[in-house]
Image: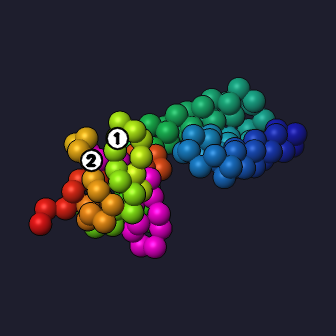
């Protein structure tokens, strides 16, 4: 009866580890632990239970992890900042990459702005956000 408790504790530990990390690493060992727990009701042979644990863990890892990774892949939803790409921004301070100056306002928020092509932009100009680098918007002047 002692190994039943050991396997149950291991299953709980692997599930907790997976819940904390959510990296699809320890869930496979939890499944193997469940199989070993079931086998502990059939036999008292610890070696047999360990082999079941290793075999089932390895089999589920190899067979199901690629499928799970595909199904659980990030959906590609844009974050609030990613939605700024392609939008127009009003330049509120002259943009000069060499002097590291420049600000713009978009959606009511003031951002540090740099020019994507190195050209200076004047206050009051309109620009388009090309990308985001850290906390800076990289823009190009809007074509008239």
Q: In which quadrant will I find the C terminus? A: bottom left
| 122 shown above or below 114 | below
Secondary structure state at the residue bearing disc 2: loop
Label 1 sits on a secondary structure element that is loop
Q: Residues within 10 Å of mark 2 (few under 14, many from 20)?
A: some
Please name the predominant secondary structure of the magenta segment in the image: strand
> In terms of sequence position, does the residue under pointer 1 or pointer 2 come before the other?
1
Rendered view: 132 above or below 2: below
From the image, tell me which residue sits under label 1: 97
User: Which corner quadrant holds the N terminus?
Assistant: top right
Q: Residue 87 placed where, x, y %?
A: 28, 66
Magenta-highlighted residues: 104-116
> Could you say where residue 22 lies in the image, as x and y percent from the top left?
59, 49
In the rendering, at what x and y percent does residue 64 appear? 44, 46
- At 56% from the left and 44% from the top, the residue drawn is 23
Q: Are marks 1 and 2 in contact (CB under 8 Å)?
A: yes
Please state which of residues 110 and 3 is positioned toward the viewer in this rendering: 110
Q: Position of residue 106 (x, y in %)?
A: 39, 68
- Gap between marks 1 and 2 measured at Cα: 7 Å
For the point 84% across and 44% down, the residue is 5
Q: Image check: 97 left or right of 12?
A: left
| Whether residue 42 is visible | no
Residue 26 placement, left or right of 2: left
Residue appearing at x 47%, y 50% in the figure: 135
Q: Is residue 115 magenta?
A: yes
Which residue was labeled with disc 2?
120
């Amino acid at each position: 009866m002692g190994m039943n408790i050991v396997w149950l504790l291991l299953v709980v530990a692997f599930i907790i580890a997976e819940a904390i990390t959510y990296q699809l690493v320890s869930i496979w060992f939890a499944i193997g632990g469940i199989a070993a727990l079931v086998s502990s009701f059939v036999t008292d042979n610890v070696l047999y239970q360990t082999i079941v644990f290793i075999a089932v863990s390895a089999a589920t890892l190899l067979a199901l992890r690629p499928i799970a990774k595909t199904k659980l892949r990030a959906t590609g939803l844009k974050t609030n900042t990613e939605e700024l790409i392609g939008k127009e921004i009003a330049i509120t301070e002259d943009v000069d990459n060499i002097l590291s100056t420049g600000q713009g306002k978009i959606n009511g928020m003031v951002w540090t702005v740099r020019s994507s092509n190195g050209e200076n932009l004047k206050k009051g100009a309109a620009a388009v956000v090309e990308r985001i680098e850290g906390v800076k918007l990289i823009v190009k002047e809007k074509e008239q």
